[in-house]
């Protein structure tokens, strides 16, 4: 055990020497450096009042954009392209970014610049909703995220003639939903799910990936994932959108469609984003790889 600790410490020292303390949050590799998920959950609900943060008017069929893991690190070319494509598309309604918006300290304002509305370039001021990722917490980043980007747990509605759809954002940035958020999700779905046609959930980590090599920001324990599978299936959730792993995956389990979106990071050799078309029967996809 001592040898393992020594090796980890040596690797951490090398990382600091090579990359600098603004790139790797060494402390965050071993212990969470921002408030724990239960505290973030409570602060998020205090900010929203547990009320819908938006009501979007749309037709019975509508489309939204999704990207993830831009890891803004001095440039934001791909995020700007995503923003421009979304806000010049007359068929779109909103966008979702599934977390890890920054890659090192001090980059959050640059990310906010990349997703800002520009009246000279954009024809529509669609909202862009954000999910909290593990990198967004590094360097005690939660307070800044809450101030500049927003809460980590919230929901909104899309209304159309004859009905509405429910969108929920969850906080899995430290590898768990935690007891308080899980209890809230269980009760929220039990009390509200039947009022909506579709329910679409966004979170950062991949429920099907058991790799926990990222320690405090790894994927969920299998036991928690299985409990969530059962909860989401029982409540007829339509789609779960996820990021974190920098690859594309699309599968269905227990009647719920789970989609992992690949990274839109500038340095990626194959960046992508997703266009989701919502229909009365479900969802259809279109992957966009030209950035």
Image (cartoon, rainbow, N blue to C red):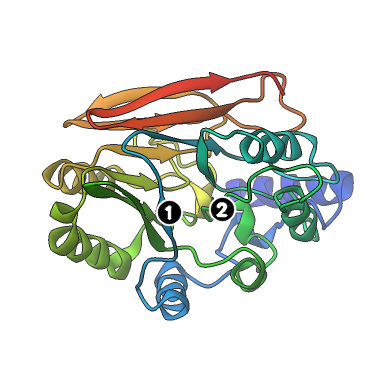
**Relative to 49, does residue 211 appear above or below in the rendering?**
above
Left or right: residue 71 versus residue 175 is right
Residue shown at 71% from the left, 37% from the top:
84
Q: Residues within 10 Å of mark 2 (few under 14, many from 20)?
A: some
Number of marks in the rendered image: 2
Considering the numbered disc 2 on the image, is that residue within a helix, a strand or a loop? Answer: loop
Residue 230 % position (x, y): 15, 44
Residue shown at 66% from the left, 33% from the top:
85
Q: Distance between the residues labelled 2 and 1?
A: 9 Å
Q: Nearer the viewer, residue 25 or 5?
A: 25
Q: Name the residue under label 1.
A: 56
Left or right: residue 128 versus residue 39 is right
Residue 24 % position (x, y): 74, 52
Q: Which mark is residue 127?
A: 2
Residue 250 % position (x, y): 38, 23
Q: Mark 2–mark 1 contact, CB under 8 Å?
A: yes
């Amino acid at each position: 055990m001592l040898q393992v600790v020594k090796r980890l410490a040596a690797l951490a020292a090398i990382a600091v020497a090579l990359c600098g303390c603004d790139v790797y949050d060494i402390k965050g590799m071993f212990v969470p450096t921002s408030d724990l998920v239960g505290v973030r959950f409570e602060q998020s609900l205090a900010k929203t009042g547990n009320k819908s943060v938006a009501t979007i008017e749309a037709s019975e069929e509508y489309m939204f954009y999704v990207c993830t893991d831009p890891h803004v690190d001095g440039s934001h070319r791909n995020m700007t392209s995503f923003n421009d494509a979304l806000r010049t598309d007359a068929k779109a309604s909103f966008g979702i970014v599934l977390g890890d918006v920054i890659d090192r300290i001090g980059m959050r304002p640059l990310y906010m610049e990349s997703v800002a509305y520009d009246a000279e370039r954009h024809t529509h001021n669609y909202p862009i909703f954000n999910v909290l990722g593990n990198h967004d917490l590094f360097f005690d980043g939660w307070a800044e995220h809450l101030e500049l980007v927003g809460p980590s747990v919230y929901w909104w509605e899309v209304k159309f003639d004859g009905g509405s759809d429910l969108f929920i954002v969850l906080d899995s940035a430290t590898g768990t939903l935690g007891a308080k958020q899980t209890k809230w999700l269980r009760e929220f779905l039990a009390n509200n799910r039947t009022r909506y046609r579709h329910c679409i959930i966004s979170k950062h980590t991949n429920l099907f990936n058991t790799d926990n090599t990222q320690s405090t920001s790894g994927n969920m324990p299998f036991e928690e994932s299985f409990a969530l599978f059962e909860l989401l299936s029982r409540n007829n959730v339509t789609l779960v959108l996820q990021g974190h792993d920098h690859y594309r995956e699309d599968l269905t389990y227990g009647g719920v469609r789970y989609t992992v979106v690949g990274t839109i990071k500038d340095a990626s050799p194959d960046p992508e984003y997703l266009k989701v078309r919502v229909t009365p029967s479900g969802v259809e996809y279109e992957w966009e790889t030209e950035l």
